[in-house]
Image (cartoon, rainbow, N blue to C red):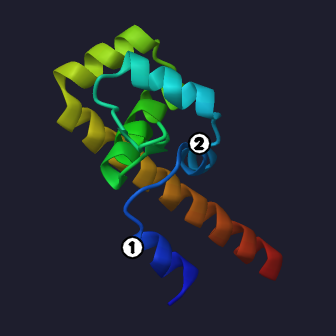
Amino acid sequence: MTLSKEKELKLFYSIGEVAEKFGVNDTLLRFWEKEFPQLRPKKGSRGTRQYTKEDIEVVRVIYNLVKVRGLRIDAARELLKRNREGVEQQTEVVDRLRAIRQELVSMKKELGDMV
């Protein structure tokens, strides 16, 4: 089994793994837990956080609102509270568009190298 397949089968992720995925520190994730009631990772017997894929999706949405769109915490919290499904859909669309842009930039570079 490949490493990527093993990761797909993983049920829980540590706070360090989630922080690394988003390029933030553990402290920020703990802060977001206090500020956003939607983010509630399970805590193990020793208090270690265990993030599910659903928790990571919430982090992705919060990251998009706060870090990408530049909303203040209170505005992001209110928007997420009022229209979580809409915000999640917007985040997904933005992520897809970024991936498409990255692919197009890569293709342009490759074509430029051929000339």
Rounded to the nearest angstrom, the CA distance separating label 2 from label 1 is 19 Å
Q: Is residue 54 visible?
A: yes
Q: In terms of sequence position, does the residue under pointer 2 or pointer 1 come before the other?
A: 1
Q: Nearer the viewer, residue 88 or 110?
A: 88
Q: Nearer the viewer, residue 104 or 96?
A: 96
- Residue pictured at 42% horizontal, 38% vertical: 59
Mark 2 neighbour class, 10 Å CA radius: few under 14, some 14 to 19, many 20 or more? some
Mark 1 neighbour class, 10 Å CA radius: few under 14, some 14 to 19, many 20 or more? few
Choose top left, top right, bottom left or bottom right for residue 67: top right
- Residue pictured at 33% horizontal, 33% vertical: 40
Does 49 sit above or below residue 29?
below
> In the rendered view, does 4 fall on the left or right side of 56?
right
Q: Amino acid at mark 2?
A: Ala
- Residue pictured at 41% horizontal, 44% vertical: 44
Per the rendering, the mark at residue 19 is: 2
- Residue pictured at 33% horizontal, 17% vertical: 77
Disc 2 is placed on an element classified as helix
Does 67 sit above or below residue 110?
above
> In the rendered view, does 75 fall on the left or right side of 109?
left
Q: Is residue 115 visible?
A: no
Does 3 sit above or below residue 30?
below
Disc 1 is placed on an element classified as helix
> In the rendered view, does 2 fall on the left or right side of 55?
right
| Residue behind mark 1 | 9
